[in-house]
Image (cartoon, rainbow, N blue to C red):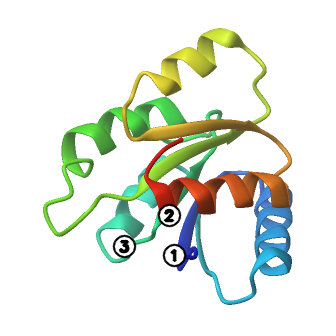
Amino acid sequence: MTIGSLLIIDDDETDLFICGYTIQRFDPTIKVVQALNGREGLEMLRREQPDAIILDINMPVMNGFEFLETYARDFARGLDGPAPLVVMLTSSHLGTDRNKALQYDFVKRYFEKPLTSDNLKALADIIETGRP
């Protein structure tokens, strides 16, 4: 299985551009949907069913951890099929942030910015095998 679509949630437009560019170079058939904060990301999930979510931590309006709490409560059960898995993509090098994110079963990996083709290969492998 390849990656069909990704939701990228990040407030930094430069990081969104880099993610989009890297994804299109990796596989130009991947549909990319973007949101500027966690709240917008949740709204997108009501309309879109991506294979995975790439999530930043530090954002205004609703940060990545607030998104994860709401996602766990409202979306992670996957009532209409499997829920999209989540990978973190952040500039935070803090072990506490990593541990806090990875406590959620649906968070499969914690990548540090910038997004790379190796990150996308790992994500494709997770989607295909179901294992991080």
Q: What element carries label 2?
A: helix
Q: If you read the primary sequence from the N terminus, does the residue marked by circle 2 or circle 3 appear first?
A: 3
Where 106 falls versus 54 (above or below)? above
Determine the residue positioned at 38% across, 76% down: 48
Circle 3 sits on which residue?
A: 49
Q: Residue furthest bottom?
A: 29
Position of the C terminus by quadrant? top right
Image x and y of residue 96, in percent: 61, 10
Question: Which of these two is toward me, 10 or 95?
Answer: 95
The CA distance from mark 2 to mark 1 is 5 Å
Q: Is residue 22 left or right of residue 49?
A: right
Amino acid at pointer 3: Gln
Q: Is mark 3 on a helix, strand or loop?
A: loop
Q: In which quarter of the image is residue 121?
A: bottom right
Circle 1 sits on which residue?
A: 1
Q: In this view, does 70 lie to the left or right of 60?
A: left
Image x and y of residue 17, in percent: 82, 68
The CA distance from mark 2 to mark 3 is 17 Å
Whether residue 113 appears in this view of the structure is yes
Image x and y of residue 22, in percent: 84, 68
Determine the residue positioned at 55% across, 51% down: 37
